[in-house]
Amino acid sequence: MAETVNWYEDMNLWSGFSEVLFTPERARAAAEVVASSPLFAFPPGSRVLDQCCGVGFFTEPMARRGYRVTGVDLHCELLERAAAGCAAAGVKASFVQADVREHVAPEAYDVVVNMYTSFGYFDDHEDNLQVLRNAHRSLAPGGRLIVDLLSKETYASWAGTPKIVDVPGGMVVMRDTILDDWARYRTDWTLVRGDKAEHASLICHVYSAAELRGMFAQAGFEEIECFGTLDGGPYDAGATRLIVRGVKARPA
């Protein structure tokens, strides 16, 4: 019997839908956030771990800002694209192929970031919590973790209505389904070009601000804050994202 492959392990999803996932607009937006957001104003020369870095949309601008960045991702193909992007920009970054449930470098970083809803991928809630615990272990005392995602509150404002995204020569139809009393959601993608169609589905946990704040505390973080925009705006009715930041305590 063939071994079941989890959706995030399937490189066909990342390559087949790259025109939706890895757009130039997303790259420009990430670069702008890193350049201007107070959330990314780290001390000069900070050592930064970019969890689930993908093609390096945040890795490259952080390296350009002078931070010493390491990107970790499950897929070597995405890491190769990230490395090529850094090389083209004339900046240096390190890359590690690893599962974020397992990757730990004790006290090796000053900052860990997990961006663009790259959190909540795993079927087991404890595995998602383990990602936060690994970040905590990998941070030096006083270091901080930043996680950016769509929360239950922000996702509810637009989930449920099918969406169409134009891509060269075709379109992608996206449909969302809420599962398990808002514990998880499924997104179904259909890429249509001419008379051909490709399908993909992904299922993620979806967390409220209160739930993710509690997970940060379980993982050992203190001084936990929630923001509603990538420029550090409040987490309120106008929030477009959930960004949670926590600090690893220094020894007493």
Image (tube, rainbow, N blue to C red):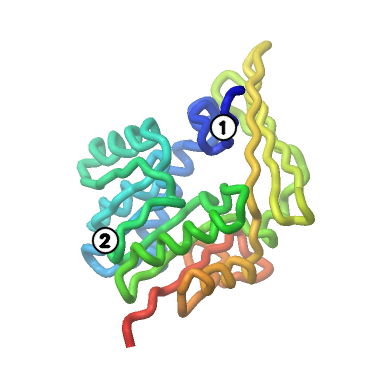
For label 1, the SS is loop
Residue at mark 1: 5
Q: Residue at image x 63%, y 24%?
A: 191
Give the image quarter of residue 168.
Answer: top right
Residue 20 at x, y percent in the picture: 55, 34
> Upstream in the sequence, badge 1 or badge 2?
1
Residue 31 appears in the picture as rendered? no
Quadrant occupied by the C terminus: bottom left
Residue 186 appears in the picture as rendered? yes
Seen from the viewer's position, the closer of residues 72 and 37 is: 72
Residue 67 at x, y percent in the picture: 25, 58
Residue at mark 2: 47
Neighbours of disc 1 within 10 Å: few (<14), some (14-19), many (20+): few
For label 2, the SS is strand
List the single residue furthest toward the top. Answer: 195
Three-letter code, disc 2: Arg
Q: Is residue 132 above or below residue 218?
A: above
Seen from the viewer's position, the closer of residues 103 and 172 is: 103
